[in-house]
Amino acid sequence: MPLFDMPLDQLRSYTSSAVEPEDFDDFWDLTIAEAREFPLDAVYVQVENHLSVIDSFDVSFAGFGGARIKGWLHLPANRGAGRTLPVVVQYVGYSGGRGLVQQDTKWAQAGYAHFIMDTRGQGYGGSLGESADPHASAGDVAYAGLMTRGLSSREDYYYRRVFVDAFRAIEAVQKHPEVDASKVLLAGLSQGGGLAIAAAGLAAGRLDGVLCTMADVPFLQDFPRAVDIAPRGPYPEIAGFLARHRDRYEPALAVLNYFDGVHLGRRATAPALFSAALMDDICPPSTVFAAYNAYGTGAAAVPGSRLGEAAGAAAPRAVPAKAIEVYRFNNHEGGQEHHWVSQLGYVAELLAR
């Protein structure tokens, strides 16, 4: 795949044309408040994984609408008694789920708690999933796939539910007695990267403990440009739907505007490490840079978290530090194992401060 998007010097200053809705924060305040009306009811059951160095727990918690969302929690077997660990909350890519219990334990192998969230209604592609999406809008008129499910309204759009699940996953893992609730590290690739950005933005001012966001070739960013130029992957589902529903372009973009990671990431207060691949034709690099360039730029206006306010510490926060690694000759696979080495160093340095 040749370079098809903007030159790198233009990418570094590119900003999205998406203008966030005036009631964006009100919408998400109400959404999170409604979600918290359901008891979190986080359950952890240790299971056999046939791995001598990792202990694994089958997890479930109440996500959007109280629906049960699954996950895995992996802990290093040699952890000290009474010790709590920083936790990496990992979100998975489009079509994937949490996978088999042994499938991905890399962060636990590195000495951290490792929580992998299942994605509702997915798990039919890259990895196995077990969490249903029981929402009524799942039967609405839509293009094949998930990108247009519930697109008729912001209340019913599929990613409203998934973003809430991602937020509540943080709350759920913080309840585990062997997790350090003050050291939560969000991570994901593609859709997982988009969910990490969304969760970081939703946590700002609502939930303490998020220390960083690691978003690799993130999906769900800069919808106006992504829908126009992405030749492959989930974004063309939206274009395919609009090719038949010719009168719904503006209404569809108006709904998607509430779920654009550019807007959610702008509110994030945690430091971030992004990655982009310049030959990526699924999540074009301009959409990734749109998210990166916006990330944290609204953080100065976000008050201290509500938990902090209760303790009398409500001063505005500084714009968080951020960095991006660029893989010039890679497509949507991005940096893969090479980038994980960078992430290991990044997290170690962050926790040492």
Image (cartoon, grey):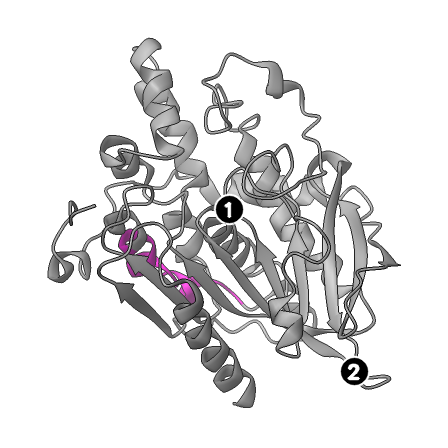
Say which of marks 1 and 2 sits in front: 2
> In the rendering, which numbered label is found on residue 78?
2
Q: In the image, 82: left or right of 328?
A: right
Percent x, y of residue 260: 40, 42
Q: Is residue 98 above or below residue 86?
A: above
- Front in this rendered view, residue 314 or 190: 190
* Residue drawn at 30 percent across, 32 percent down: 227
Q: For mark 1, give the secondary structure.
A: loop
Front-most of 95 and 198? 95
Q: Amino acid at mark 1?
A: Gly
What residue is drawn where x is 78% and y is 82%? Answer: 79
**In terms of sequence position, does the residue under pointer 1 or pointer 2 come before the other?**
2
Give how far apart the Cα atoms at labels 1 and 2 are. 30 Å
Query: Is 141 left, or right, of 105 in this rendering?
Result: left
Residue plotted at (57% across, 25% down): 156
Q: Residues within 10 Å of mark 1 (few under 14, many from 20)?
A: many
Q: Is residue 318 magenta?
A: no
Q: Position of residue 53 (x, y in %)?
A: 75, 75
| Residue 319 point in image, percent of width and height | 38, 71
Tell me where the magenta segment starts and ends, as one range. Answer: 289-303
Residue 24 horizontal/vertical position (percent): 46, 41
